[in-house]
Amino acid sequence: MAAAALGLTGSYIATTQNPIQFDIDPLVAVSDKEWATLFKTTVDKMDVAVAAYLRRKGIAPSAVKAGTSPGYSEGAIIMGVYTLAGKSAPQSVSAPVLSEKGKALWGKISKTDMKQYTGRGAYTGFVDNKNTVGDTDPVGPRSTARFLAPAPGLLNPDPHPRWLPPMDSSLWQERKRKVEGTYVPWGMIGGEKAGKDPSGADTGATNEADYVTICMHKGGMVFNGDITTSDIAAYTHGMIQAIYKAYALGPSCEPYEIAVGSVTKKMASCLTCTLFMYATGYPPTSIHLGRGESWAPLYQPYNPNGPTGDHEAAVIRDLNNAWYEKCLEWLKMGLEILDDEHITDDHKASRNAVSQFLSTYRNDKTVAGVIILDAVTVHAGEMERIGRTLK
């Protein structure tokens, strides 16, 4: 994940000759000075490593900056800015310029007058539709939803096989339930807390992992399919769902994420969403380096509200292919940035292993994207991963 973040950063600066900024929630910046200092230190490390790489390539480096994301307010938005269609970011996260129909739907979503997920990490996908002919209806709410990672043989073409630790791996020990002795399936958010007491007593859960899952379900998250220890849980965020839909509907349509609920308030896109957004031409209005736990793209049309369009499956295929391609580019560049001068000694072996893996499967165009998907099933903040990888 450090390589992916550095590759994105280096590529952006080399291509645009502009700085790139990573943001911390302004509420956290004020309330947790130690965390804010650590964040600034990590971004400074990124700046040093990327600048050294760009100098080696003869490209004048531009800064990697640490900043704060826009402040939270009810209904505040993050936008995927479709730059190829001449779109621009809204001047205010609390007052986007929307169509009349879009404004009405945004208001309903903002006030949670519609069925949607409102728990931890609740940002609702929404598409404003400014078409003047044909389909002119906005789309939403599209909340983060849980899926099963597709099994081999279900897609054409199939992506590289996913990584699932064998049951005798020590990685499963923290996913062993405190009371029953069974295991929480791989990738389930909160699964690494299965050995801890539940933090609340209102659900009947015997451990924190099951408590998190029950709270998510009670908060309105849709769980698609039953997950066993032979499966991998995957979570597709609202912004990603909105991007597929906006692209399918046409360049007059704009994808957003709307802040709902009161649990999570940072107005920025996670790194995993950011990689997809840049790859597909919809860069976010702000980027954070928190968690993108078990993030995944869609693999087939998913429409909890509204009809499925004729070309949605093709759009998912094409945008996913664009994402796979950019993941490979960014990982390769990031591994170069992680030279011996800038990587910690205890991460050199893993850097070399990733390089070898990419070389071994050089003919598989999906392998880099799948490595990233597998990496984020080990739940950690990207700031921590990057910070401990870079000197």
Image (spheres, rainbow, N blue to C red):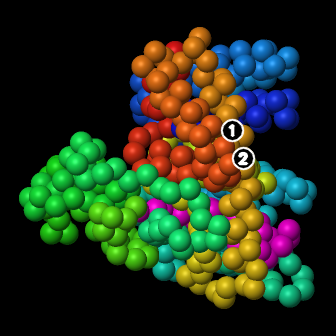
Is 368 above or below relative to 333? Answer: below
Amino acid residing under circle 2? Lys
- Residue 323, given in percent of the width and then of the height, sits at 69, 54
x, y percent for residue 64: 69, 26
Residue assigned mark 1: 330
Say if residue 70 shows up in the picture. Answer: no
Q: Which mark is residue 299?
A: none
**4 on left or right of 51:** left
Q: Looking at the image, which residue is at 90% across and 82% down?
A: 132
Q: Nearer the viewer, residue 68 or 365?
A: 365
Q: Residues within 10 Å of mark 2 (few under 14, many from 20)?
A: many
Span shown in magenta: 233-255
Placement of the N terminus among the 4 image quadrants: top right
Question: Residue 251 location, x and y as percent?
Answer: 86, 68
Gap between marks 1 and 2 measured at Cα: 6 Å
At a point 74% along the width and 74% down the height, the residue shown is 314
Q: Residue at x 29, y 63 (%)?
A: 229
**Circles 1 and 2: CB distance less than 8 Å?**
yes
Instruction: Give 321 or 78, whichever is nearer the viewer.
Output: 321
Magenta segment includes 160: no
Report x, y in % for residue 149: 47, 65
Rendered position, 355 above or below 111: above
The residue under the point 84% across, 35% down is 15
**Type of the residue with mark 1:** Trp
Image height check: is 62 above or below 118? above
The residue tagged 2 is 326
Callout 1: few (<14), some (14-19), or many (20+) C-alpha neighbours within 10 Å? many
- Quarter of the image holding residue 298? bottom right
Q: Is residue 59 left or right of residue 150?
A: right
> Is residue 254 a member of the stretch shown in magenta?
yes
